[in-house]
Image (tube, coloured by chain):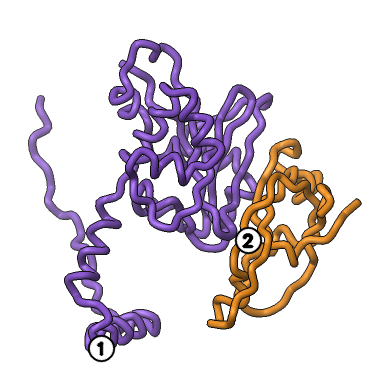
Amino acid sequence: MTSRVRVRNWHPPGHIRTPAYLRGKTGTIERKLGPFPNPEQGAYGLAAKNLALYRVRFTMRDIWGDTAEAPGDTLEAEIYAHWLEPAD
Amino acid sequence: MPHDHHDHHTPPRPDNDEPLTYWQTMEIAVRELLVEKGVTTPEEIAGAIDRMDARSPTDGARVIARAWTDPDFKVRLLTDASAACREMGFDIGPMHLIALENRPGLHNVVVCTLCSCYPRYLIGPPPDWYKTRAYRSRTVREPRSVLAEFGLTLPEGIELRVHDSTADMRYIVLPERPAGTDDMTEDALAALVTRDSMIGTGLPRQPG
């Protein structure tokens, strides 16, 4: 995984742990965690595949554009590997 | 003149005699079945609730105070916060904890926009406001305004970092040790650490 990543702009139904406000946004990997069982499968009692989990750092400008309250502030969230694509 | 007369007209709290919700009914049904089948007992369930309720911010405060007084422990806390808490004897269950260090120029605050993930295994149940839609949505959109409402106005030169607890990790903020506390013992320092200072919506108390 490259260090610049984009959160996929998917909108599937069901139990998702990727917040809507981060979909389609580009950030930088802060650290790799896991593996953890995929909650999108586990939530339905299915056999959950182990996935890497990444902490991704965004600037508030990355997320909210120029209307951000303080564009240089940052936000970190945990995003599962299958939601990320290289942004370089 | 002393004001010694109080009206006692506080409205009573409404009884919770609305019909059960779907999930409340489901919880009762599953619990009764588990008891009936001998998988667990009411005593075991009550004991588990007691143990969760006994957890409080004072446990987290002891971890913070240790990090303020023991540089090696602080390194271990920032490397693997779960292991550091267990090393101090806290039973934090299966929790995966990350400690976020405040330092000059950087302030951290924690939110869970998806639900109400919180390090309850270390510092007990979250405050009610932590679970509100207002806190959860505004803290990622206008966190400085939210902090200002808590009485914490961050100067422009300080980076604010919001941590959205979206998946498996839980977070605790390691606040900066207040100035003027060089002579204080670890126990006295722990008394300065507030719940909100570990969420990031506040700072530790000042000594004295």
Disc 1 and disc 2: Cα gap in Å? Answer: 34 Å
Q: Which hue belongs to chain A?
A: orange
Which chain is represented by purple in the image? Answer: B
Residue B20 versus residue B96: which sits nearer the camera? B96
Label 1 sits on residue: B37
Q: Position of residue B50 (x, y in %)?
A: 22, 59
Dividing the picture into quarters, in which one does residue B145 lie?
top right
B101, above or below B207, in the image: below
Q: Which mark is residue A35?
A: 2
A25, above or below B58, in the image: below
Q: Position of residue B74 (x, y in %)?
A: 49, 29
Q: Which mark is residue B181?
A: none
Q: Position of residue B48 (x, y in %)?
A: 26, 64
Q: Position of residue A76 (x, y in %)?
A: 66, 47
Residue B38 versus residue A39: which sits nearer the camera? B38
Residue type at mark 1?
A: Lys
Chain at numbered mark 2: A
Q: Residue at x 30, y 28 (%)?
A: B191
Report the side of B94 relative to B90 (left or right).
right
Asked whether the residues under marks 1 and 2 belong to the same chain, the reply is no
Report the side of A27 relative to B115 (left or right).
right
Dividing the picture into quarters, in which one does residue B3 lie?
top left
Q: Quadrant of the N terminus of chain A?
A: bottom right
Residue type at mark 2?
A: Pro
Asked which secondary structure carries label 2, the reply is strand
Q: Residue at x 30, y 57 (%)?
A: B52
Q: Residue at x 49, y 42 (%)?
A: B81
Asked which secondary structure carries label 1, the reply is loop
